[in-house]
Image (tube, grey):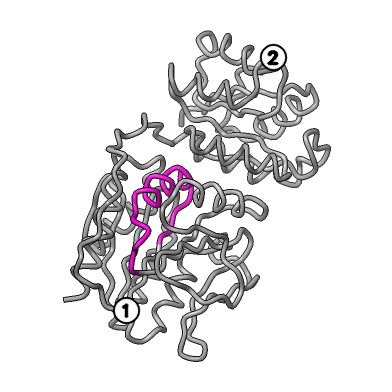
Amino acid sequence: MKQIRVLIVDDSAFMRRILTDILEKDYRIQVVGTARNGKDCLDKLEILRPDVVTMDIEMPVMDGLEALKKIMENSPLPVVMVSSLTQEGAESTMKAMSLGAVDFIQKPSGSISLDMEKVDKDVVRKILIAGQARVNPPLKSSNEKVRFPDDRIEEGQLIAIGTSTGGPRALQEVLTSLPGSLPAPILVVQHMPKGFTKSLALRLDRLSDISVKEAEHMEEIHNGVAYIAPGGYHMEVVKHNERLVIHLNESSPLNGHRPSVNVMFYSIAKLPGISTTSVIMTGMGADGLEGILATKEQGRAVYTIAEDESTCIVYGMPKAIVKSGLADDVCKLNEISRSIIQSLQIQRR
C-alpha cells in the first residue's frame, strides 16, 4: 500500500512534533515535512507534494483559512484543519469546511494541547480517510432556489439527511437551495463531535431561506425547519401527545457513531403514517443503510436519494445505498435539492 504523504502546518513547534509522532506510528502514513504558517506551507507544497495537509487555523504571517483558500484555488488537495474547541475556533472550522477542507481534528485543550495523545486514534483515522478523499472544485450553482409547486403537499412527510466526511459543505449546497416554504421538517445527522454542530447550524441558518438549528430535546418539529443532531447525541423522532418531537440521548455509539444516521432512521421506522425522503451524502462507511432497510421492512414509504460518486468527497455511505439497490435516485450534489422537492410530489400520490 502506498503511504499517505502528510505536510503538518502549525506555528507551534510542540504541536508539529506531537502530530508527527502520532502520525508516524502508523506505517501507512509518512510525514514529509512541516511548516510554521500558511505562507511557509504554500512555499513547500510544490517541493514536498503531500497527499494531505493538516492545517492549524490561528497562525502568524498567513493564517490557516487564507492558506486553505489559496490551496483550493491553485492546487486542490485534501486539507484537514486542526481546531481548538472554542466558539471562535468552531466558527472558523465551519468556515474552513465551506471553503473545501475535508475534515477537522479537535485539539483537546486549547491551541497548544499537551494531551493530543487522547485523540491519537482519531487523528490517524481522519488522515487515512483524507488520503482517500476526492477534492472537487465547487459545482457551478445557478444561485436560484428550487421552487416549490403551488399544489399543496399532504402532512405526514419527513426529510432525513445523513452525512459524514465532507458533509458540512454538502449540507450548505443542499439546504441553501431549498425554499423557505418547504412543507416538511428536515432531520440531519452529521458525524461531528460536541461543540461544533451549533456553529454549523448557525452558519447554515444565516445562508438559508429555511430555518436551521441545532436540535433540542423534546422540541416539536415543524415544516421548513432543519434540525441538526447535536454532536455527541443520538437524535430520534418520536410521537408525543399526537405530535412529532425530537428525542436526544447519550446511549452508546452505534458502530462508532454518536450521532448515528441509523439510529435516526430506526426511530422513523416506528412512526405510523409517515412518508420519508431519505438523503445519504458523502462519508466513509455505511451508516444509514441498516436504518433505511428497517423503514422499508416496516412498510414505510421511503424515497431514497444517494449522492453521485462524482461529487462525493468520500464515496462510502452513498455507495452502500447504491450497491444495496435502495436508491430511488442517484444525483450530483447540486441536483439533490431538486430531487427532494420531486420526491415530496411523488409520495403524495
Left or right of residue 117: residue 309: left
Residue type beneath disc 2? Val
Judged left or right of residue 45, residue 112 is: right
Identified at 50% across, 57% down, the residue is 212
Residue 155's label in the rendered image is 1
Relative to the observer, which residue lies in front, 49 or 231? 231
Residue 313 in the image: state x and y as whole percent: 40, 40
Q: Position of residue 188 (x, y in %)?
A: 46, 61
In terms of secondary structure, where does tag 2 sit? loop
* 214 to the left or right of 325: right
Across and down, in percent, residue 155 comes to 32, 79
Q: Secondary structure at mark 1?
A: loop
* Nearer the observer, 344 or 41: 344
Q: Which residue is mark 2?
A: 61
Q: Which one is earlier in the sequence, the residue at label 1 or at label 2?
A: 2
Q: Is residue 328 magenta?
A: no
Real-space Cα distance between discs 1 and 2?
A: 55 Å
Q: Residue 15 — which label?
A: none
Q: Residue furthest right?
A: 114
Q: Rate crowding at label 2 as few (under 14), some (14 to 19) or many (20 or more) other CA atoms within 10 Å.
A: few
Image height of 110 relative to 228, above or below: above
User: Residue pushed farthest bottom?
Assistant: 241
Task: Find the magenta span and give its range.
Answer: 161-183
Residue 163 drawn in magenta? yes
